[in-house]
Amino acid sequence: MPAWTKVYMLEEPKLDKPVLVQGLPGLGFVGKLAVTYLIEELKPKRFAELYSTYLMLVDGSTGIHINPNGTFFLPKLEFYAHNRTKPNIILLTGDTQPNIYGQYEVAEQVLDIAQKFGCERVIAIGGFQTPAEHEHGRVYGVFNPPRLNEELKSLGVNITQSGAITGACGIILGLGDRRKLEAIGLLGGTKGEYPDMKAAKGVIEVLSTILGLKLDLARLDREIEEMKVRLESLQRIQTEALRQVKRGLGREPTSLYV
């Protein structure tokens, strides 16, 4: 059966050489969190939706997502247009990223839409997994062409010198580069085990400078603190549970049933 990918245009936005900013679920949900925050703050207009057989549910099956109120929706990517600042911006996000068989096809469709409106630069956001706690929240970057090096360094971005970027984040950069677009990857340092708002904040700060945005990060700071409290509480619960298990294992078997 042939693959199926379709874009539905909801309206034709007026954009002048917009920058495409992609943030999809991945390591630490960094890309998804960052673009969602921009959408909530900038309140751009949703102008297109992309549906595909390559967009699947979390468990890898096809189907629909069900909302708490009983309504449902197909997995999709959503395009938002923001033209109230320079440069104009196209924000792309979704609830999932394409599976490995559809990364290229979906990325090509995304770039077709972006270039239809004159896009000359694509920025992909993702997570940079690192176990070192002092690196959490740092922003790492890759780029093409080489002249972008100084721009990123001036923003405090740590230039990545080896490794690979997998998934939709890497493919959109690679295909964008093949189309002679400026391609920048901004990766937030994260442990990668939970929605990492600290890593997302680091990327948002760099991104807001690149895009000339003045954002209020107070709400994000509050969410970071709330997440920190929840994680510390969870860690205490896990530590206490482990102590209980160890104490239980140290007793006679009958004591486990007292």
Image (cartoon, rainbow, N blue to C red):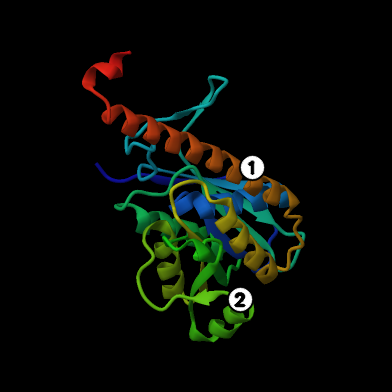
**Quarter occupied by the C terminus:** top left
Question: Which image quadrant for residue 241?
Answer: top left
Query: Viewer-proximal residue, 165 or 200?
Result: 200
113 lies left or right of 165: right
Residue pictured at 59% horizontal, 62% vertical = 203
Q: How crowded is mark 1: few (under 14 residues within 10 Å), some or many (20 or more)?
A: few
Question: Which image quadrant for residue 245?
Answer: top left
Numbered disc 2: secondary structure: loop
Mark 2 and mark 1: span between their CA atoms? 27 Å
Q: Which mark is residue 86?
A: none
> In this figure, which residue is indicated by the disc labeled 2?
156
Amino acid carrying label 1: it is Glu
**Quarter occupied by the N terminus:** top left
Q: In this view, does 171 lie above or below 77?
A: below
Q: Is residue 187 visible?
A: no
Query: Upstream in the sequence, badge 2 or badge 1?
Result: 2
Question: Which image quadrant for residue 62?
Answer: top left
Q: Is residue 195 visible?
A: yes
Q: How crowded is mark 2: few (under 14 residues within 10 Å), some or many (20 or more)?
A: few
Numbered disc 1: secondary structure: helix
Q: In this view, does 182 lie above or below 137?
A: below
**Residue 20: % across, % down:** 57, 62
Residue pictured at 63% horizontal, 76% vertical = 155
> In this figure, which residue is indicated by the disc labeled 1?
226
Residue pictured at 60% horizontal, 68% vertical = 118
Amino acid carrying label 2: it is Gly
**Residue 207: % across, % down:** 63, 65
Dot in front, 2 or 1: 1
Query: Viewer-proximal residue, 147 or 155?
Result: 155
Q: Of all residues shown, which one is farthest toward the top?
A: 258
Query: Viewer-proximal residue, 197 or 180?
Result: 197
